[in-house]
Image (tube, grey):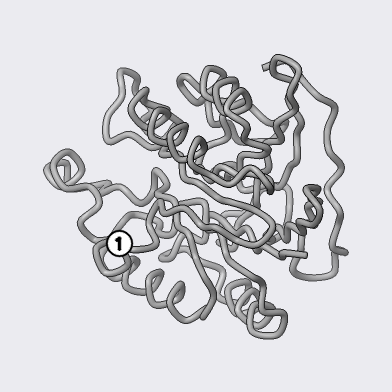
Amino acid sequence: MTRLFHVSDVHFGREDKAAVAWFDALVAAEQPDAVAMTGDLTMRARSHEFDAGLDWLKSLGRPVTLEVGNHDLPYWNMIDRMFRPYHRYHAIERIIEQPLDLPDVTIVPLKTTSRAQWRLNWSKGYVSRKALAKTLALIADAPRDRPIFVAAHHPLIEPHTKASAQTHRGAEAIAALAEAGADAVLTGHVHDAFDIAHDVAGRTIRMIGAGTLSERTRVDPPSFNEIRIADGAFEVICRKMGSQSDEVLPVEAPQPA
């Protein structure tokens, strides 16, 4: 069995220090096979936030793949946002949007952030045709003897959560991913956990969202997902900090994409 810790939206600068320490202790004690961080490592993409977040990721001592969230793009400096939006990631470039090949699962990235959009709210999701083509190529090269997960920041289809993603071309993307053979899309952004199955042309693809380790909680307390994969099947356990019990997330009824 492979155990994956799926964490998201830590928002260094507004991180919940107790929640981060709780997560660190679980990683040290349980030694998951890998950590998938699906974006919003920082709050405002400031240098000191990146320094703290990157030090944290390196301190985990586990294989990590990291997606870029909308909060990780420069917020105040529009020149940086337009012309060098990822320059502060260079210290750990080797783990950004990188595939992970594990014994029971392959994880490939999908970029859903955009430095600018033709709408007022640039925080929402956007899947470019170039980004989707890159992910589909990675899926085509992935081993077929294990599930394939796609790691992204924004949910591709709206979950039943307090916050929304409104991902442009999200429905097109999830249909293409399902047809290519992906089994699940790991996401963040909305700060609450979910596991939703979508039927696409006779295939089922699950969209799995992790909560947050920041102070910006919504419905759930600080949390992350543990995903257990074995023999081609997987289940998602929402690990919650505090008095609430951990919960095997129910797979919500399939919805047409």
Toward the viewer: 53 or 35? 35
Residue 43 x/y as whole percent:
40, 56
Residue 197 x/y as whole percent:
76, 31
Toward the viewer: 10 or 233? 233
Above or below 2: residue 23: below
Residue 33 x/y as whole percent:
64, 70
Residue 108 x/y as whole percent:
50, 46
What is the three-letter code of the residue carrying label 1? Glu
Query: What count of labels does the image hold?
Result: 1
Toward the viewer: 93 or 75? 93
Q: Residue at x 58, y 34 (%)?
A: 155
Task: Identify residue for label 1.
Answer: 93
Q: Is residue 72 left or right of residue 80?
A: right
Residue 115, picture quadrant: top left
Q: Is residue 122 left or right of residue 46?
A: right
Above or below 222: residue 176: above
Above or below 179: residue 206: below
Q: Secondary structure at mark 1?
A: helix
Toward the viewer: 102 or 255? 102
Residue 196, picture quadrant: top right
Q: Residue at x 25, y 52 (%)?
A: 86
Q: Residue at x 87, y 42 (%)?
A: 250
Q: Residue at x 78, y 48 (%)?
A: 232
Q: Quadrant of the C terminus?
A: top right
| CA neighbours of label 1 inside 10 A, class few (<14), some (14 to 19), many (20+) | few
Q: Quadrant of the N terminus?
A: bottom right
Above or below 71: residue 139: above
Q: Is residue 222 left or right of residue 66?
A: right
